[in-house]
Image: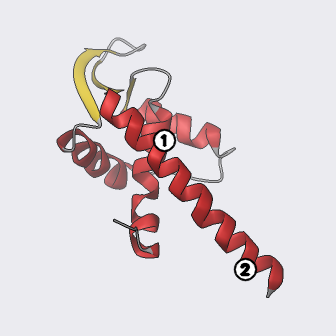
Amino acid sequence: MAKTANDLLQGTLDLLVLRALRDEARHGWGIQQRINQFSQDTLSVNQGSLYPALIRLEKKGYIRSDWGTSDNGRRAKYYQLTPSGKRQMETETEIWRQFSAAINSILETI
């Protein structure tokens, strides 16, 4: 099923979260920091958006969570990409590349 532009924009956060978890499990704050790092501080994800996305991704089976201890000794929930999540990240990345190429093409020709 083809995605609409609205679906793509709403799914951007999900893609960023999946990408932030590609290499290792992270807790919420770590995910936020990784997205900031990827975007060179251009994007900032607030907790009010991040945690609903984490719940949504976990319900879909794209991530799983386990409790652990953070670097500062506090109990934290760590999120990890599942095999299904990795496939979804790859699919969504390709869709995003096609979408952004189309937008760039329009911006360069109009």
The crowding category of the residue bearing disc 1, from other C-alpha atoms within 10 Å (few below 14, some 14 to 19, many at least 20), is some
Q: Residue at x 82, y 83 (%)?
A: 109
Q: On the picture, is 3 further left or further right than 109? A: left
Amino acid type at mark 2? Ile
> Residue 72 versus residue 57: which sits nearer the camera?
57
Residue 48: x %, y % from top left: 32, 54
**Can you identify the residue that label 1 sits on?**
90
Quarter residue 82 falls in: top left
Q: Earlier in the sequence, mark 1 or mark 2?
A: 1
Give the quadrant of the N terminus.
Answer: bottom left
Q: CA distance from mark 1 to mark 2?
A: 25 Å
Q: On the picture, is 109 further left or further right than 20? A: right
Q: Residue at x 51, y 57 (%)?
A: 95
> Residue 100 versus residue 49: which sits nearer the camera?
100
Say what secondary structure mark 2 lies in: helix
Amino acid type at mark 1? Glu
Quarter residue 2 falls in: bottom left
Q: Is residue 6 above or below residue 89?
A: below
**Can you identify the residue that label 2 sits on?**
106
> Residue 69 versus residue 16: which sits nearer the camera?
16
> Residue 55 versus residue 102: which sits nearer the camera?
102
Give the quadrant of the C terminus.
Answer: bottom right
**Numbered mark located on residue 34 in the image:** none
